[in-house]
Image (cartoon, helix red, strand yellow):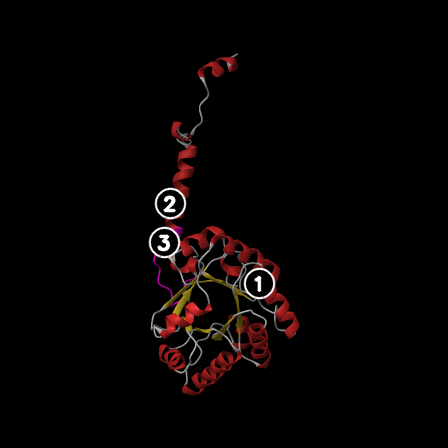
Amino acid sequence: MKNVLTFQKLKDNNEKIAMLTAYDYSTAQVLDSAGIDGILVGDSLAMVALGYENTYNITIDEMLIFVKAVARGAKNSFIIGDMPFMSYNLSIEQGLENASKMIKSGAHAIKLEGCNDHIIELTKRCVESGIPVLGHLGFTPQMMNTIGGHKVQGKTADNTEKILICAKKLEEAGAFAVVLELMPEVSAEYITRNLNIPTIGIGGGKYCSGQIVVTDDILGKFTDFTPKFIKKFANIHDTALQGVNSYIKEVKEGLFPSQKETFDLEESEKTKLIK
């Protein structure tokens, strides 16, 4: 089974780390069977699975339902539970309590956004308590309202240096890796080169230690919008739509179910039903 040492070993061996999101049992099974290194039960499920406009509305209790489902489906991948908006910001105690719920629900680690003093202390306390932490810098969705929307971060040398300082603080606090989201490739590469722990890019270019994206995006299942940094490796939406249309047509025309999909009854029993 993969763990935090797996991530560090891959980085040290100059091997890329492959991560994806999953929100349900069957998707987790597929990713696990494919040999994915890590699965993030991301708060992006608020939009992708629950239809919210953003990630703000999902609660810790809702997140735990999906963490449990993914944990049942993935037996070898490293599972990370995303701590939702305001589930860890009020106090260290609140953060530790909710982080422990994630672990008890089947996650092997948690993800925290930002690097203010509270986050650094919480990261340290979680690691000391046996809870691995994945940091998250660059564009942080839970701060979207204060940074003015989906904005690329690290667009200047000064801003990149500030993000690197944050990443080093997270590294010193014990984080096993750091997500770098929506950053120029050169900025993310610079940060990666100056850290000992792995970086996981999402819209951060190919020089990060690894990559993570939303599974529903790369498989073409979620179609509300497609980020610039997404490549579609399949088109589940159109395939599913075609299948459903075919189903409706066959039901309407009386072609489904056919004899192949029907259970039969013994002839001797059939005669008893004839009146």
Give yes or no for residue 226 being in the magenta stretch: yes
Q: Which mark is residue 235?
A: 3
Among numbered discs 2 and 1, the one appearing first in the sequence: 1
**Compared with residue 33, is residue 229 higher up or lower down, i.e. above or below?**
below
Position of residue 275 in the picture relative to residue 245 (left or right): right
Q: Residue at x 53, y 73 (%)?
A: 113
Give yes or no for residue 157 being in the magenta stretch: no
Question: Nearer the observer, disc 3 or disc 1?
Answer: 1
Q: Nearer the viewer, residue 214 or 132?
A: 132
Callout 1: few (<14), some (14-19), or many (20+) C-alpha neighbours within 10 Å?
A: many
Q: CA distance from mark 2 to mark 1?
A: 38 Å
Could you say whether the residue bearing mark 3 is in a helix, strand or loop? loop
Task: Inspect this view and state whether residue 209 appears.
Answer: no
Magenta stretch bounds: 225-237
Among numbered discs 3 and 2, the one appearing first in the sequence: 3
Q: Residue at x 35, y 69 (%)?
A: 16
Q: Tell me residue 133's x, y (percent).
A: 52, 71
**Compared with residue 213, is residue 115 higher up or lower down, i.e. above or below?**
below
Among numbered discs 3 and 1, the one appearing first in the sequence: 1
Could you say whether the residue bearing mark 2 is in a helix, strand or loop? helix
Question: Nearer the observer, disc 2 or disc 1?
Answer: 1
Which residue carries the number 2 mark? 242
Q: Which mark is residue 102?
A: 1
| Quarter occupied by residue 195 | bottom left
